Image: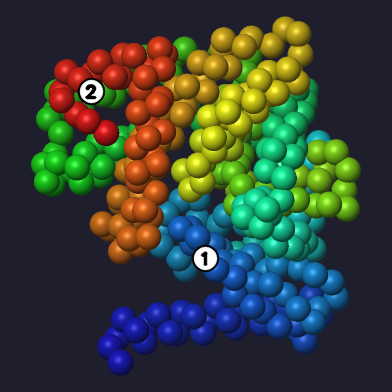
């Protein structure tokens, strides 16, 4: 066994000891921990059985690669409490060990939107509930009253740059984009971001899609929509989470359902709601997110060996081309044509 494997095993053993000590400290020492399937993040979840009540153990270990923010359980705790205080369903935090990146949280179960839809549940009903949840959040007068980073031009541009840094070479035999193209690409995005309305700012959950929503059938109204995976939340535009739901990179939503849910969201909003500002942010952020994910999924393959994400590229390409053909994205489409760059 080489040193790297020994080091990894030792690290895992240390994490297991910290998990065990945490569970003993909160008097759940007889509980069993079942590791749940992982996503692309560093977080891990364990289903807790044999304890006092159904629960999950969230682990974001401090010894993971130093990608900020370094301890993600703290923002999860803060945002969960904030959203629940506004009347939304987030997991109750039962116990915490911030130093070691551990949270014991309420277990909402396995009834994710995605699993329900795949089993034949009424798709429209679930999307209506999700849209109603977002519109209620965006109408809430205290929706921004939590200290979070801004979903700023800098952050959005950084995400959009992944298209040029990773996807462009992937599509062009490892050839990098010209400096001229890169600079014009940056300038075009910045101009597009300048069009966002400050009146449409809200907490943006960032990963609002069917894999992170749980249907809680024993609750009524928007409380039936269980929220997960919001620790990356920021303050940004109304349009982002609506777009994230309807233009899910991992699941194709029909254009008819997309339009119906957009219309429902707009109907739910107050009379002074600016529809054009909303659609502008939706369209720009649609293209930005597709740009980010096209690059990110290539990066996950090339850098991290996670080739399974490449299967999402065809649909992402479709979403990106749809976005480029919207009038608001005309400057970017013209730039791509100028430099003969085809998504």
The answer to whether 73 is drawn above or below residue 220 in the figure is: below
Residue furthest bottom in the image: 1
Mark number, residue 336: 2
Give percent across and percent down for residue 40. Answer: 46, 58
Residue with the mark numbered 1: 38
In which quadrant will I find the N terminus? bottom left
Regarding mark 1 in the picture, which secondary structure is present there? Answer: loop
Rendered residue at 62%/11% (across/down): 275
Rendered residue at 64%/9% (across/down): 274
Regarding mark 2 in the picture, which secondary structure is present there? Answer: helix
Rendered residue at 69%/32% (across/down): 131
Q: In terms of depth relative to the viewer, which is nearer, 20 or 273? A: 273
The answer, for residue 79, to whether it is visible in the render is no
Give percent across and percent down for residue 223. Answer: 83, 43
Residue 56 appears in which quarter of the rendering? bottom right
Q: Is residue 39 left or right of residue 45?
A: left
Give percent across and percent down for residue 238. Answer: 61, 24
Callout 2: 10 Å neighbours few (<14), some, many (20+)? Answer: some
Q: In terms of depth relative to the viewer, which is nearer, 328 or 319? A: 319
Measure the alpha-carbon separation of dots 2 and 1.
36 Å
Label whose residue precedes the other's in the sequence (2 or 1): 1
Residue 59 appears in which quarter of the rendering? bottom right
Rendered residue at 88%/43% (across/down): 220
The answer, for residue 247, to whether it is visible in the render is yes
């Amino acid at each position: 066994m080489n040193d790297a494997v020994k080091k990894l095993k030792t690290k895992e053993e240390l994490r297991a000891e910290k998990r065990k000590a945490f569970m003993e400290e909160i008097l759940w020492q007889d509980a069993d921990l079942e590791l749940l399937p992982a996503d692309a993040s560093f977080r891990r979840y364990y289903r807790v059985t044999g304890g006092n009540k159904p629960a999950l153990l969230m682990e974001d270990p401090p010894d993971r690669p130093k990608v900020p923010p370094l301890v993600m359980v703290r923002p999860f705790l803060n945002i969960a409490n904030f959203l629940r205080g506004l009347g939304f369903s987030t997991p109750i935090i039962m116990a915490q060990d911030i130093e070691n990146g551990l949270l014991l949280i309420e277990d909402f179960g396995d009834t994710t939107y995605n699993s329900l839809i795949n089993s034949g549940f009424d798709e429209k009903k679930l999307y209506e509930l999700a849209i109603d949840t977002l519109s209620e959040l965006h109408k809430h007068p205290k929706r921004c009253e939590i200290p979070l980073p801004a979903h700023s031009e800098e952050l959005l541009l950084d995400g959009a740059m992944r298209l040029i840094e990773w996807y462009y070479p992937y599509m062009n035999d490892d050839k990098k984009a010209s400096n001229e193209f890169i600079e014009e690409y940056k300038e075009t995005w910045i101009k597009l971001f300048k069009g966002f309305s400050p009146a449409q700012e809200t907490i943006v959950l960032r990963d609002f899609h069917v894999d992170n929503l749980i249907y809680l059938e024993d609750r009524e109204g928007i409380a039936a929509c269980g929220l997960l995976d919001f620790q990356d939340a920021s303050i940004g535009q109304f349009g982002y989470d609506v777009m994230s739901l309807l233009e899910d990179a991992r699941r194709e939503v029909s254009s008819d359902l997309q339009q119906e849910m957009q219309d429902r969201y707009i109907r739910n909003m107050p009379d002074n709601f600016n529809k054009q500002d909303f659609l502008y942010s939706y369209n720009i952020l649609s293209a930005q997110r597709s740009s980010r994910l096209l690059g990110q999924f290539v990066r996950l393959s090339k850098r991290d060996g996670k080739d399974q994400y490449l299967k999402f590229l065809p649909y992402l390409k479709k979403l990106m081309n749809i976005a480029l053909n919207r009038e608001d994205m005309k400057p970017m489409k013209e730039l791509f044509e100028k430099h003969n760059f085809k998504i």
